[in-house]
Every structure is written in structure tokens, then in C-alpha cells.
Amino acid sequence: MTDWLIINAEIVNEGRRMTGDVSIRNGRIHNIGRSLTASANARVLDANGRWLLPGMIDDQVHFREPGLTHKADIESESRACLAGGITSYMEMPNTRPPATNRAALEAKYARAAEVSRVNYAFYLGATNDNIDDIRNLDPKSAPGIKVFMGASTGNMLVDDPTILDAIFRDAPTPIITHCEDTPTIIANEEKARAIWGDDIPPEKHPLIRSRDACVKSTKLAIGLAREHGTRLHVLHISTADECALFEPGPIAGKRITAETCVHFLHFSDADYARLGHLIKCNPAIKTADDREAITRALAEGRIDVLATDHAPHLASEKAEPYTRAPSGLPLVQYALQCAIERVLDGKLTLERVVEAVSHAPATLFDVRERGFLREGFHADLVLVDPNTPHEVTQAEVLSKCGWSPFENFTFRSSIAATFVNGQLAWHEGSLEDSVRGQRLEFAR
């Protein structure tokens, strides 16, 4: 393993900035300081004043393996992570078969050990009939238990009140929820079908997957968590109304936390006219006012974590009429740059973005020795160039689906380098395919 010395970096970590150097030995951060000297065998990378951050930990991705690998797989999507400065991910259970028992969960870990370019972990999925699997889950084997409290793949909609109560009471790990109220969505879609049939206009999606559906389900999850003292994390907040349900401030000590996603900071319902089903996702992208409220909530710590909900589909699938066009979009390759756009707009500080994409997920999920630039921690790092713009082209997309909702958009920053466990895996647009990630460990 090559040792490294990164010099002349603007180091951003734990709410502070400093100009300095970082030495890496045996895959870990050896020293952080000024005027460090390279060891005999170390390579030197001159940051030239660029931002050195802890790698992003994405707490919500869908890599589609097993069962849906025609549109994505662990290898392809983890390669896209490298280009985007994401050094660890936590992947969702709604694959085919779903990861709803120990055997299916461990099969995904085994596959990732072979092909994942970045570090990995996998959620156990809840169903209406796997409460014993949930109760018997080793807390160190998964970041959490994913509960779909809204429509999802196959048997993964948990809508039995007795089962929901038991999950919130007995879960041995944090509970991670997708909150949308299914009866509300069904009623809204039936009304839309009566007018447009299968070809419902894309801009009606946020009226079908409505704010009322989100708020009703989020309130239910929060109520159950308060009743049972559950460690609850609510995913992909998409409305101003939901932001008000969470407390501002640091994540330390919170029992109920929230996440939003980069596309909710970037797009609004005005973009359906241009992008159509390409930005169809669940929950839906809503108004510009919601976007501004979510950004403010992220700034003040009402929303704790910023992630992607990366969920690729083929362009041909997205071209289908509304009722057949799947929800989800590929995001990992440009997520950090998307967040930095809000920094350059003056709406978020860089320190707050680092907290939301790295420190907070590490703290929330008890990730061992990652998510911070600390001596002795794994050297998962990203070097960001805030002065070199990057125009997104279809040809550079690494996700297997082959497209991005950001095509032809110019980000004002670029990802100069990504280190995974001390190995330079992405540098100036070039990917080192020999790098492999490690299974995340949880200090529980």
C-alpha cells in the first residue's frame, strides 16, 4: 500500500479550517499539521490550496444488485461514487430478492467485497412478516432497519399497525423510514387517472405523491418513535411542512433525526417541464419554496444528513408514460458538487456541508473510525477544487444507466481526487480500478 503526503491543503473538518498537510500511512491518517515531512516511500500530492474534506458517507443508495442489474450494479455505481467524492455508502434492501433476512444481507456483503470500489454497508429491510429477523439482527451487521411506510417494491410496504408498533419497540438498531402515506397517494393517482389515463403529465407527480402524504406518514413515524424511545432517522425530507417537525441543532444526543437529498436542494417543480420523468422520484420534488425551506433547515441542523437516494433507471424506462415510468434518478457522481453549489450561493457554509455529508452519518450510525479527518482514522478523503468549473456530459457518466439529470449543467467546482482507505482511487478525471472498499464497522 502506497503512503501519501498531501501538502498545502485547506483542510475542512469538525467546523474548522486550517491550511496544512495530511500524511497517510498504511491506509490511515498518520498526521495532520503544517510543514510535514514525507516518509521515505511516500508519494506527495500538492493540493495547491484546494479543499481537503473527509469523504462523503452516503446513507441512502439503491445499487440494484441483485436482481435489477440491467440498470445498475454494485461495481458500476461504486465507480461513480469515486468520481463524486463518496467514499462509503449504505445501500437499501429493496432488491430482488430483498435483503429481509440474514442470508440475503450477507450475500450482498460478499458481493460488495469482490467488486465495490468504495466502503459499503447494507440495511436489513422490514416487511409485515419478518419481525423475528429484525429482533435477531446483530446490531454490528447493518447500519439500520429500513421501513417503507409508503409504497415500495414487492412485500416491503409495512402497513400493519401491529407490526409497525413491534418494529419501533424492538428494533436493535436505528430505524430508517421512507415516509409517504399510501392511501393518500392511491386516492390522488386515481383522480389523476380519471383525467389523463396512463399519460399523466410529469408535473402532476408532486400532487400525487403529495405533501399531505409525506407529512401524515412522517408524523406517524415520529409519534411511534417518541412512544417507544426509538432511534429514528427519517429519509429524504421533501417539504417545508416536514422541516418544522424536527429540532434544530447538533446531531449529538438526538433520538429523532432527518435527512434530505441533493436533488431537493437543486431542482423544483418548474424543472418537470424540461426534464419530465427524468426527475420523477419518491417522494416528489416539490416547489421552489420547499427547496428554500429545506436548505434553511439543513443550515440550522433541523435536517441532519445530506445524501442522494441514488436510484438509477434506464432512459428507455423513464420515457414510458407516467404510470409505467419508474421513480428515481442517478446522483452519486455529482452529489458533493451539487451541495457545494449551495455553498457558493452563500446558502450553506462549507463546514455545514461537511458535517451533513460526513460527520453526521458517521455519528448517527456509529461508523467506526470514518467520517472525520482524525489521526488514526481510515484515510477516506476528497480533494475539491472550488475554482475549476465542470460541465457535465453524458459521455462521462459512470452509472450503468448512462445518463444524468445534470447533463449540460456546469458545476462551479470539481472533484480533483478521492482517497479510499489511503489509496488514490480517483485523480483528475482518472479512475484507479484496482481499489476496493471495506465493509463498514459499527461501534455498537
Image: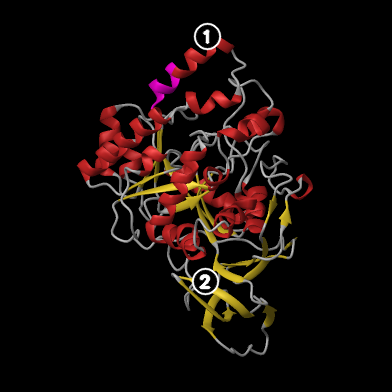
Residue at left offset 56%, top offset 38%: 268
Residue at left offset 52%, top offset 15%: 192
Residue 71 visible in image = yes
Along the line of sight, which residue is nearer the eye, 354 or 350? 350
Q: Horizontal and vertical percent for residue 16? A: 46, 73
The magenta stretch is 181-187
Q: Splitting the image into 4 quarters, where does residue 400 fall? A: top right
Which numbered disc covers residue 13? none
Q: Main secondary structure of the magenta part?
A: helix
Q: How far is disc 1 from disc 2 in space, using C-alphas?
A: 53 Å
Residue at left offset 44%, top offset 27%: 210
SS label for mark 1: helix
Residue 356 relative to residue 430: left or right: left
Along the line of sight, which residue is nearer the eye, 332 or 420? 332
Which numbered disc covers residue 194? 1
Q: Residues within 10 Å of mark 2 (few under 14, many from 20)?
A: many
Which numbered disc covers residue 12? 2
| Residue 16 to residue 443: above or below | below
Question: Nearer the N terminus, badge 1 or badge 2?
Answer: 2
